[in-house]
Amino acid sequence: MPPGARNDRLRAMLRATAWTFGGLARAVNIAGAEVGLRLRYDRTAVAHWLSGARPQDQVPALIAEVLTRRLGRRVTLSEIGLYHADGGTDGSGGVDGMVDLAELTRADLDPAGHAVLAHTVYQLDALVVAASPGTARRVRLHRDLDRTGSLSQPTITQHIAEVFAAANHQFGSGATRTALTAYLVHDVLPRLGTSETEIAHRDLLGAATDLALLIGFMCFDSNENGLAQRYYRTALDLAVLSGDPVRYAVVLRHLSQQACHLGHGVQALGLALTALTAGSGLATPHTSAFLHAQVALCHATLGHHEDAVAHHCSARDSLRDAIGPPPTFGSYHQGELAYHAASILTLDCDTNGAITALHTALRHYPATERRSRLLALAALAERQLDIGLLVHACSTAHRFLDDYPHVFSGRVTTAMDTLRKRLRPLRGHPSARRFLLRGASL
């Protein structure tokens, strides 16, 4: 569309949605918030777009996404007269998982590339997935030794993945993400094309799936939800390529967690149920608990109380049957069980029950899972504020501040901002004032 020309394509699409100018603007603002953009568009902005002005940066993709959600079909940039000036595509993928991972990670390592990727649009229709990886087979755990009897490279890669995962738990996504991405780009991906045996290749492919999943979670933890979704979908493609139903289920569970976090409860429940089906009969008790817990949370989000309780009990029972060391990816423990119980109780408006559950979660969370402890402390302080326990809430908030400077996490920063907003109107009280002053000093 020539610069300055009326955008009749967007006008026709807007007419098909029955939205007002203000309705479209509000939808774009909400979709922008999902990917960390603070947009303040109103009906005037929409009028400018219809007159031929091109929105900046990622906004055309956001407009296409909200229209997609409204109409129930994929709407392209060309259909709304906002195609890329360079003739490029919408960037929605569709390439082989290995190629997509290589291109995505290399662009992500480049500061200029990451600046663009960070605001990748989160797409609801990308949550439509197959019920299983197709060529699923039962995957046995084993240690692959080379001719000298030393550990093979895939096992070393799995060990390094465990190190990165542990650092993510303790220090947050911002501490090691660049190093993890570089390791995947410069070490793991080149070796995937040179694996000497089928077993070595399969194990290395599984490790690459885990690392892509972990980077996706780090993006989610950094509130970069569109980029997180791209990594998750790439990890899902790799799980299909390796025919690993358990890894497939674990990735689906993460996609469900993200969708639930963003308020897309129906899609989140569909993903969680598909994950449970894919892992049925194959997942360890730890992972089975991990999958049931997400189904429970999704049901609670949608107000399905009985289903939520039933799946939460199934998660508890699976955890009771778990023996031996938990897996690095797809694991679950008593702290997480209690934290999810608190979330379900909060949605059921049982604030006192949620407070009790959060105290239980904090007793069970390992000291090494610092980010999870911080999120539980923030939730506890909020629930205490809900029932007027200001002094207790401020005491809990100070415990939150003790570890806050040591964790680099967008979700933790959001929790901190929420506590400040809730306590600022109460700053006349000495306890609230002390927290706000201490928080400001950090």
Image (cartoon, grey):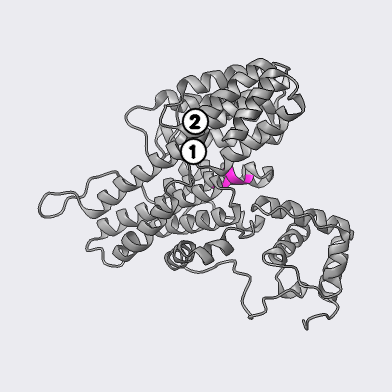
Q: Quadrant of the N terminus?
A: bottom right
Q: Are marks 1 and 2 in contact (CB under 8 Å)?
A: yes
Residue located beneath label 2 in the image: 403
Quadrant occupied by the C terminus: top right
> Which mark, by number, is residue 343?
none
Residue 55 can be seen in this image: yes
| Mark pair 1, 2: CA separation | 7 Å
Q: Is residue 146 left or right of residue 79?
A: left
Which residues fall within the magenta stretch?
A: 255-259
Residue 111: percent from left, percent from top: 50, 63
Query: To which quarter of the image does residue 387 belong?
Result: top right
Q: Residue at x 63, y 42 (%)?
A: 261
Residue 407 badge: 1
Image position of 254 with respect to 380: above or below: below
Give the residue at x 35% y 57%. Answer: 183
Identify which residue is drawn at 50% across, 51% down: 216
In the depicted structure, whether residue 84 falls above or below residue 442: below
Majority secondary structure in the magenta region? helix
Q: Residues within 10 Å of mark 1 (few under 14, many from 20)?
A: many
Secondary structure type for disc 1: loop
Front one among 10 and 39: 39
Please rate how many residues cluster around mark 2, counting C-alpha atoms within 10 Å: few if below 14, some from 14 to 19, many from 20.
Answer: some
Residue 343 is at least partly visible in this image: no
- Which is more toward the observer, 247 or 138? 247
The x, y position of residue 53, in whole percent, is 80, 73
